[in-house]
Image (cartoon, helix red, strand yellow):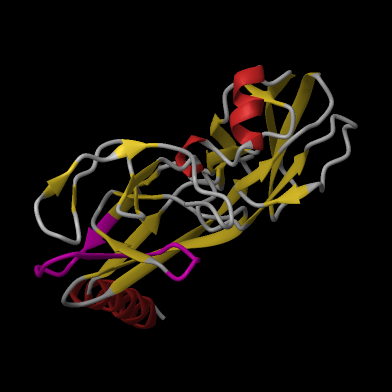
Amino acid sequence: MNGRVVLVVAASVAASVGSLARGEIIVDVGDDIWDDEGALMTFTADVEVIGGSGEVVYAWDFGDGLVGSGAEVTHAYGDNGFYTVTLTVSDDVGSGDDSLQAGIVNAPPNITNVTEDLTATQGEVFDFSVSFTDPGFDDTHVVEWDLDGDSVFGDHFGANGQTSFLELGDHPISVRVWDDDGANAVAGFTATVIVPDPATVLLSALGGLALLRRRWDSDRQEANGAVGRHEGMAGGERQCGLGPRPTSGGA
């Protein structure tokens, strides 16, 4: 009977020694974690290597198609959701692994710039624009505008546009940026519409100062511009005079 006990104990000890000789790696990556999308997260682990003498390799799988290596790594998620983070540690005689869940919370867009308050005349077309960032760098976005101040968005879509007003006074203009997870940011500016300067109205009616014609007449030939010289048919320089365009049948 005693011989059997000794034999069993000896076999158990031999098995334990053999296991240690082959090597064992114990990995603990800790508890599940939460953070916002775009936030830079740090991952570490408690690792115990039993046996083995070669290089220890740390291989991280972040669950979003990206991987990392090293005893300590950082990673940011571009979209909200739940991700399984797995660390596999290996050496020349064995390996071990452990996992945790990373819960990533959606973050709203951030409007960084929008058109400043401006003054425009009746009917004058002006530009408007917005720029923004999003911690969720994998998100897609919709940009919509309220151009008539009725708090209903959808008068224009896109980051840039143009508009004009005929009614005098202040016109509030708002923009709203949505991400594909339902978060949004709102900003706006005021366009103040005034009566045009009378001189500007006159020039506009005439087609603009650039379209006013200056006529130089010499030997029944014309030139446009404020200054000009002309060589007559008979040769030599002639003086050029500024005068009205001849009417039909005029000399």
Seen as rendered, the residue at the extreme front is 251
In the picture shown, does residue 54 fall above or below 29?
below
Q: Is residue 232 left or right of residue 24?
A: left
For residue 111, which quarter of the picture?
A: top right
- Asked whether the viewer can see residue 117, the reply is no
In the picture shown, does residue 199 fall above or below 230?
above
Q: Quadrant of the N terminus?
A: bottom left
Residue at 31% across, 76% down: 6
Query: Is residue 125 found inside the magenta-colored segment of the image?
Result: no
Q: Is residue 201 left or right of residue 135?
A: right
Q: Nearer the viewer, residue 195 or 229?
A: 229
For residue 194, which quarter of the picture?
A: top right
In the picture shown, does residue 61 fall above or below 219?
below
Q: Position of residue 209 (x, y in %)?
A: 49, 35
Q: Position of residue 99 (x, y in %)?
A: 49, 61
Segment tinted magenta in the rendering:
48-65
In the picture shown, does residue 60 fall above or below 181?
below
